[in-house]
Amino acid sequence: MPDQPTALAQAKTLLEHGDYYGAANAYQRAATEGDLDSTALTDWAEALAFTGRLDLALEKIDSALSRGGGDGGTYAIKVDILRRLGRLDDAFAALEQAVHAVEDYAPLYVQWGMLLAEQGVPEQARWKFERAVTIDDGFAPAHLGLGEVLFGLGLPEEAAAEFARVGGELDKRNGPALVGWARSLVALGKHDEAVTRFEEAIALEEEQPVLLDLWRETGVALYELKRFAEALDAYGKAIALESRFAVAPQQKYLVRYGSAQAALSSNQPELALTHCGDGLALLDRIGQGESDAAASLHFASGAAHMMLRFFDEAVTSFRGAAEASADFALHSMNAVASVLAMQGNYEGAWEELSHVEEARERVGANQESHLDDEQLSAYGTALLWLDRLDDAEGAFEEALELGDRNAAAWAKLMAIHLERREQDIENANEWRWKAFRAYRKAVSLVEAQHGDRSSAEPALALGLLHLLMDDLDKAEPHLQEAAKLETDNSLPLAGLGLVLVRREKHREAITQFELALKREPDELNVRCHLADAYFRLGRPTVALEIYEEVLRIAPGNVGAQFGAGEILIEQAEETKDDRLYEDAEANLSKAIELAESARGGSRKRRGSSGLTVRQWADLYYLRGCARIKLYEAKKGRGIAQRSGAGRLHLQDALRDFEACEATRVRPHRARRAADQVREGLKLSPLALTNRYATYAVVSITFVVLLGVQFAFIRSGGFNGDHDPIAYSTLTLSLLVLLAAGFYLPEVLKLRFGGIELEKGAATEEGDVTLDIHREPLQASLHAALDPPVPRGRTVEPGDVQRRSESRGDALRGTREKADSGGSRKDAKQGADESVD
């Protein structure tokens, strides 16, 4: 039977080595052999607390304090025991007593700060942690607790400074400090530095359950850096850890959602669908199937189906996102409209967008506050498509007020200013400068994310931004880079095709458009670009076949109707087939009708898009030319004079030229054409000649010919007294003149030759069928800058783990004594961390 000093020494040894059950039993034996002093009672209480016998531990700590031997560490243990017992009022009272008994003891203020933070009064907690820092600036738990409170108060920059004080100076192996530092850096948008801090924390937490969350948060930061392959790998490591630790379903969901996003951006839609399905199953299991979290997964599924060209399934998923959460009403509306437009169902797409205000009200009612920046950006995108430019600009500006690092919102503002430059020609330079300012901001934000050369997304975004601003030299290398990195997306190749078209390298452009269509054969917009390139190359027959193919799928495609009409006019001129002018007029009239229906305020929109002012000018001028040609063709067949159709064609052509002149795009061209048509409609010598010359020449010649023949017969024919050579010459001349009279209309068509000769100028100033600024429902370039999936509204796993980490660290060193050796200190720190 050992004597008392031997039993007490054994208890102290066991406590220092973390054997709390053994230490508690040893102190029990020591107590039976003799009275224990306050220090031994405190150690006994600590061992009991770690084994969960809180009531008995409180009894021992009170005994120690009653003997007057309590120091700051003793009070700290008592406060922690009272907190764990739920006796918070007693805990606060003990703290009040402690700070009077022990002057300026930092760990007590740390305990006080943690209790106040748990009570939901972070500002008061902040004061206590700051007091602890003032007392002992080298006390790591004080800085750690202050960092947690500052982060919770929305002050990430100040929080990062406190975490950096711990993880960078006081204790470089402090895992919770590194994690808090990383999370603060994420909140500050410094994702590169955050990844480094997360990796340092992961190296310290080799076998801890928190490792799964650290890999997930690393994946989030890598995703924001556009390092999608690395993000997918990080999420994969998190998934692999699920079999090693008890993981809450919410944590599993977060990993699946993040992995689905990374898979989408890595062009792996099948993997994304797998993770979305697993995530939805997890949500159903925890009873949160109808939530923002489910909506996020439904929307990601829709994006994956879009990549796989499963349009019906995509629409179902997008609508499912809106049904699961009103927060996604605007995003889903835009996505469904895009799917319908890609299938050529423009009327359905416009009908979807017509509910934009209802969708906004749904989101606002659900938010109970202002919309966030992504929702405002989605609202602005719908308004931009609907040509409500003022409202759209307001939405994007409001979104940027909430966060000016939204590159897509800056790109949309640029698109709005470019659109206004097209509509307001007189102030075009002013609008271009406004667009340029937004363009520079968008480019700077995207370039900041372009450090990872394995991702195509930043390169594609930069290429599209430069292309929208017509900076072809800058656009081309980025589009080439994106085309190499992403082998399934047609947009980089289509963008390269547009660059080459603008450089008038049509043969090379055709190659790029055809490669783009091999990647995504359903892209109607790319087909229109291909047709236009063939037409410019001088192969109108091939171009017309492509346009007709587009129109079989999507008769509402304005660009295809426009392009087909222009080609038919050219073919009619080459083949002299006048019937082609009727087909051309029909196509151009349909293009105008569809474009008119797409104007803002129209009740029922049916066309793919509206037109710019320059396009309206070219379209009206082209149809006016077609109507002139149709008039001349009918006049040549004698139809115009008999039915009055010719005059109607001239009047219609005049209205077209007047409409063209009203656009103020090359007004002199339209004015000259209109003046010539007005002359044709007047009773002037020119008009009379055009209308009646054929009849006059043929009639007079025929009468003279009959007179000559009658005189010849009456004079006895060839046996009579007359000159047979003169008769033959006169008769032959009259027959030639009669024949010429029937061909006179073809000659008189040259009276409108000025209009015909200027028709080709319609394509010199700008694109007729190509317009990257205004194809909103055909994968427009500014829409391509949107993220494939909006920022997720997710199920958070809770902050219990974070609180336990910080609290464990805050308790470090609260009872270090002068006689404590290094082994006791290390064991004590490990023991304190496991209190929770």
Image (cartoon, rainbow, N blue to C red):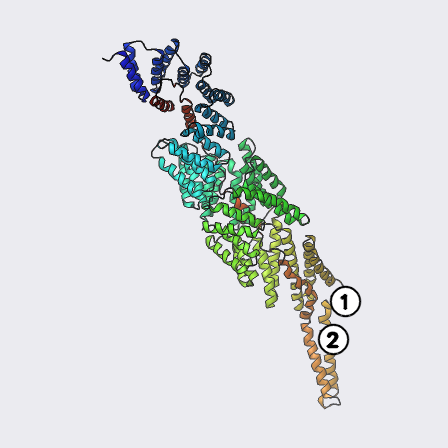
Residue position for label 2: 700
- Percent across and percent down for residue 562 are 59, 56
What's the residue type where badge 1 is placed?
A: Pro
Circle 1/circle 2 CB separation < 8 Å: no
Residue found 41% across the figure and 41% down from its top = 232
Residue found 63% across the figure and 61% down from its top = 760
What's the residue type where badge 2 is placed?
A: Ile
Quarter occupied by residue 711: bottom right
Does 618 appear above or below 454?
A: below
Does 580 appear above or below 204?
A: below
Task: Answer yes or no: is residue 230 visible.
Answer: yes
Secondary-structure class at tag 1: helix
Secondary-structure class at tag 2: helix
Residue found 68% across the figure and 70% down from its top = 747
Tell me: 732 left or right of 795: right
- Percent across and percent down for residue 181 are 46, 31
Answer with mark 1 or mark 2, whichever residue precedes in sequence: 1
| Label disc, if present, on residue 685 of the rendered structure | 1
Does 104 appear above or below 426?
A: above
- Percent across and percent down for residue 531 are 54, 58
Does 598 appear above or below 27?
A: below
How far is disc 1 from disc 2 in space, using C-alphas?
18 Å
Residue closer to the observer: 745 or 389: 389
